[in-house]
Amino acid sequence: MDRFDAMQAFVRVVEAGSFTKAAHTLHMSRATVTQLVQQLEARLRVKLLNRTTRQVNVTADGAAYYERVVRLLAELDDVETGLPGAAAAPQGVLRVDVPSPLATTILIPALPGFYERYPDIVLDLGASDRKVDLISDNVDCVIRGGQLADQSLVARHLGDLQLGVYAAPAYLARVGMPAHPRELGDGSHRIVAYRWSAGADGFPYAMHRAGERQPVQGRHLLRIDDGNAYLAAGVAGLGVLWLPQYMARAHVTAGALVPLFEDWHVDPMPLYLAYRPTPYVSKTLRAFIDWVVELVAARGAIAPSSHRPPRSPRR
């Protein structure tokens, strides 16, 4: 038995809660992972995991062993990268998933600077608005706008997306310029609806002005689950959009979108970077988080974070 491989397998099973998911992220067979953990338990003469047909739970001894092993693996990583002649800079593959508009508008244009700073990090970048399971999808971290549904994750508040309401000139020429948000529900106007998750039809926005609050009950003929496609639908004149300012800015400048209700405001949308709870955050992930925080802070359309600490996972 390779003790290092066995410890890594055990740690991954604890974090994934499943031998199958752990095997997927380790690129091993489930049988191999099972055998490594069994050999580790035999060597220690301690039961580390309670297994049933439906779930895997860590024992009290296993929890104590997990905490020490994670620290040991982290120290081993630091020792190896700290040796003279060893690669001290962050390196390796980092799997990240971000909203498609954030990727195309902010993240990807800034990547040349990232690689100048971290030439040995390989980013496996998913650009989508789909719901990602960090364990089963083997993703190290995600960036998402809005409140995170998975409260088990550690969330770093990056800032707040400033939102506005927009429509294409062709749409306004066809149906007219609305003077008040309530007009979006009078039957003549249409919105482009955004599908936040599978089966969710809710429209979460309300407009505010000098103590006045106006919920928006717009009608839609189109519902989309991708940010870039949502933007394209608005530019095509298919309805009114609610957009982060960073997405709308270039299109407003080009005359493809017109801001509406500029004396009203919409509550900003929080932007989070989230990752799995673990006692040790790798040097590579730490480097990416620091770079994203710096990048977001430099964008005028994203209000900087109030420096609230990362949200601890709820137990």
Image (cartoon, rainbow, N blue to C red):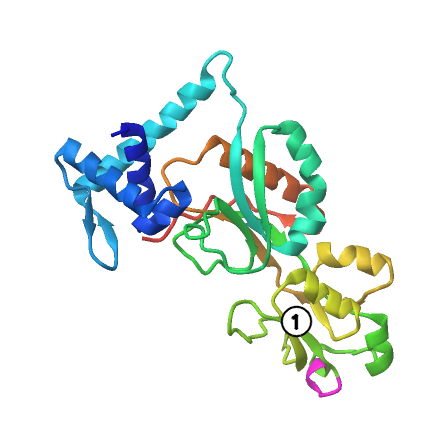
Determine the image quadrant of residue 54.
bottom left
The answer to whether residue 164 is visible is no
Q: Is residue 239 visible?
A: yes
Q: With 52 as the anchor, is 70 left or right in this view?
A: right
Question: What residue is drawn where x is 84% and y is 64%?
Answer: 256
| 109 is higher (above) or lower (below) than 284 | below
Tell me the quarter of the picture where residue 219 sits. Answer: bottom right
- Residue 185 in magenta stretch: yes
Q: Residue at x 65, y 40 (%)?
A: 295
Residues in magenta, as a range: 184-188
Which residue in the rendered view is the most extreme toward the top?
84
Across and down, in percent, residue 14 comes to 30, 45
Quickly name the residue at label 1. 207
- Horizontally, is 223 left or right of 77 in the view? right
Residue at image coords 87%, 62%? 255
Q: Amino acid at mark 1?
A: Met
